[in-house]
Image: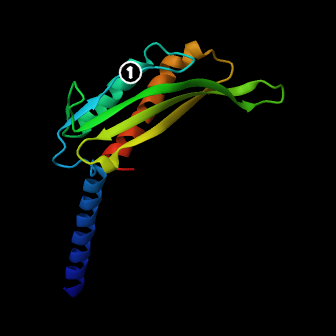
Amino acid sequence: MKKLKLFSFCLLFIFSLTGCIKYSLSGAAIQPDWNTIYVATFPNYAPQQNPTLSQDLTIAIQDVFRNRTKLKLNSNENSDLIIEGEITGYDITPEAIQSNSIAAKNRLTVNVKVRYINNKDESKNYDKTFSAFQLYDGNAMLSSVESSLVPLIINDIRDQVFASIAMDW
């Protein structure tokens, strides 16, 4: 009987810890008094351009905050939180050079500079650069794989920005 009580206590303790971990990883840095967020359009200043990257990245960041937090999207800079920045790089570099000096893979990398302004807690403000990449076959033209690579890169950058703000990473 004593072993059963001990086992039950241990099981209850483990479940309570699991609950704490889940809570602390789901937007723990978003304080209850933060209500609004403004995500400005990310202009594309990269030397090489993707015509939809600016709009797609902006919408992805807006959507992640709208869907994963209680914050309301605001259309002006009088918000509790402000995210703005610009796309600074859209680069293709060769990877895995073969013996014949031809790249077996190419890397598409996107760099985004983000300014985060927290009007409720200025100690959280930052300027950071986020980067993500995807590899693709060296024989493929970027135009033939771009539509499948760019959404993956956008999602990666979106998740990095979200984690840095909502989870205070």
- Where, by quadrant of the figure, is residue 34 drawn? top left
Position above or below: 10 against 154? below
Q: Can residue 87 be seen in this snapshot? A: yes
- Residue positioned most to the bottom: 2
Q: Is 114 displayed left or right of 102 in the figure?
A: left
Q: Which residue is mark 1?
A: 56
Q: Is residue 55 left or right of residue 76?
A: right
How many callouts does the rendering have? 1
Rendering coords of residue 8 (x, y %):
21, 75
Question: Which quadrant is home to the N terminus?
Answer: bottom left
Residue 21 in the figure: left or right of residue 45: left
Determine whether the residue tagged by mark 1 lies in a helix, strand or loop: helix
Q: Is 13 above or below relative to 131?
A: below
Give the residue at x 57% y 18%: 47
Nearest the eye: 168 or 138: 168
Q: Nearer the viewer, residue 30 or 145?
A: 30
The amino acid at mark 1 is Asp
In the image, residue 76 sits, relative to residue 17, either above or below, namely above
Residue 89, image x, y percentages = 54, 26
Q: Position of residue 134 (x, y in %)?
A: 55, 30
Q: Would you say residue 167 is visible in this rendering?
A: no
* Residue depicted at x 24% and y 34%: 37
Residue 125, position as x, y percentages in the image: 35, 44
Seen in the image, is 144 located left or right of residue 23? right
Give the crowd class for mark 1: few <14, some 14-19, many >=20 residues within 10 Å: some
Q: Residue at x 25, y 61 (%)?
A: 20
Q: Quadrant of residue 128?
A: top left
Residue at horizontal 35 percent and vertical 40 percent from the top: 162
Q: Which is more toward the observer, 41 or 118?
A: 118
